[in-house]
Amino acid sequence: MNILLVCAAGMSTSLLVNKMNEAAKEKGMALEINAYPIGSLDKYASDADVILLGPQVRYELNNVKSKYPDKPVSVIDMRDYGMMNGGKVLDFAIKLVEDAK
């Protein structure tokens, strides 16, 4: 599974990627998780199984959904993002992919 996180600049979201990778390792899952700025979305979205937007770019949700109608797209919960709760964000991403099948 390839999880794409999209944010304003990529700094804090990179920390979340690390936390998500730790959670995936604990679950014995081998996943591809990356974070990129919203301006780079078109370059990386085609490989993603799910696209998660950081709260700071939630205003782009409808735009991203319309550009990638075949992919699950959602906004990361602000509390989980702020607390860098990688496990909860990972579970959320997995559920979005499963629900889209």
Image: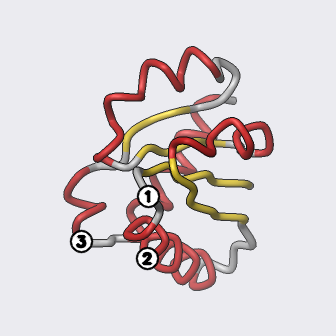
Q: For the residue marked with disc 3, what is the amino acid?
A: Met
The numbered mark, 3 or 2, whose residue comes first in the sequence reads 2
Q: For the residue marked with disc 1, what is the amino acid?
A: Ala
The nearer-to-camera label among 1 and 3 is 1
The numbered mark, 1 or 2, whose residue comes first in the sequence reads 1
Q: Is residue 30 left or right of residue 15?
A: right
Q: Is residue 55 left or right of residue 51?
A: left
Residue 9 numbered tag = 1
x and y percentages locating residue 33 in the rendered image = 64, 64
- The residue indicated by pointer 2 is 15
Tell me the residue at 69%/35% (across/down). Answer: 42
Instruction: Indicate whether 32 appears above or below 49.
Output: below
Q: Which of 46 and 74 lies nearest the eye of the viewer?
A: 46
- The residue indicated by pointer 3 is 83
Label 1 crowd (10 A; few <14 / some 14-19 / many >=20): some
The numbered mark, 1 or 3, whose residue comes first in the sequence reads 1
x and y percentages locating residue 44 in the rendered image = 73, 46
Could you say which quadrant of the image residue 62 lies in? top left
Cα gap from disc 3 to disc 2, whole angstroms: 11 Å
x and y percentages locating residue 34 in the rendered image = 63, 62
- Give the structural element (helix, strand or loop) at label 2: helix
Q: For the residue marked with disc 2, what is the amino acid?
A: Leu
- Give the structural element (helix, strand or loop) at label 1: loop
Tell me the residue at 28%/49% (across/down). Answer: 77
Do the CB atoms of the residues marked 1 and 3 lie less than 8 Å apart? no
